[in-house]
Image (cartoon, rainbow, N blue to C red):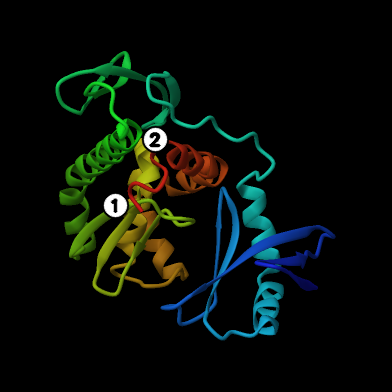
Amino acid sequence: MASEQGDWLELSTPTGGTIRVLKSAHPRARRLRLTVTPKGARLTYPNGTHVAQMTAFLRHHADWLEQKLGEFHMDAEPLPGLKVGVPTSFPFRGEETTLHWAEGPYPRVQHDENGITLVIPGPHHRELLVARGLLATFFEAQIRRDVSRWLPGYIPQINAAPTALRIRPLKSLWGSLDTRDRINLDLALALAPPAALRYVLVHELCHLKVRNHSPRFWHWVESILPEHKAQRTWLRAHGSGLKAQLDRLIADVAD
């Protein structure tokens, strides 16, 4: 059962709980779309959609919605926000690292055995925005470096290649392959162990051969990356935490 509460819909789940879903009209939306992030659930819909259609759509996806929200541990303590000059820690390439701050003539990132240092010019009202932008660019560069090392080995095995690689924060996915054969990867994968990033890359490369998740698709994945199940399990267990970490580090800079 679902009921309307202002800009929210309340859905009664099969297990007796209640889920609040933010509903948001979008002028370019062509269909109903349900997404789940560490911030909660959102239903995007085309203008003019009747609330009865929305509630029916939510009821149909009630089991999935409850499972995804459970994976995101919505009752977890919120992470501390990024503050200029205040050291903090976060996972990077699967290992806990410390973020330091320093002042310098131009913005840059220093990465060594002591952690990651953001070097930012003197006091300025845009320091936080600059810091977030530096981190987003640094994370993207790390992913591109890994992918550029791995692709030459995988392309001959698959006998196909993506037309482009795009890296950005993804709300609920880790990667996707669009109709133009462009691979999209989640920026949060820079925080994961390289093995997890490698799995997501191989997963999307295999979609160049099979566009669905049929047994034939998983046969391709298995043949190229036999240890893929361990990485899938790792992402399911730790993925929500990585996405939350990325969100507090870069906010909407890279959206």
Q: Label 2, label 1: how many angstroms apart (C-alpha)?
A: 17 Å
Q: In terms of sequence position, does the residue under pointer 2 or pointer 1 come before the other?
A: 1
Against 222, is 76 above or below? above
Q: Amino acid at mark 1?
A: Ile
- Residue at x-position 80% and y-position 65%: 14
Say if residue 153 shows up in the picture. yes
Q: Residue at x 54, y 44 (%)?
A: 240
Q: Quadrant of the N terminus?
A: bottom right
Q: Is residue 161 visible?
A: no
Quadrant housing residue 29: bottom left
Crowd rating for badge 2 (residues with CA inside 10 Å; few <14, some 14–19, many 20+): some
Q: How many marks?
A: 2
Q: Position of residue 80 (x, y in %)?
A: 53, 29
Q: Is residue 243 left or right of residue 185?
A: right
Residue at position x 78%, y 59% in the image: 18
User: Which label sits on residue 167?
Assistant: 1
Residue 92 x %, y %: 38, 30
Disc number at residue 193?
A: 2
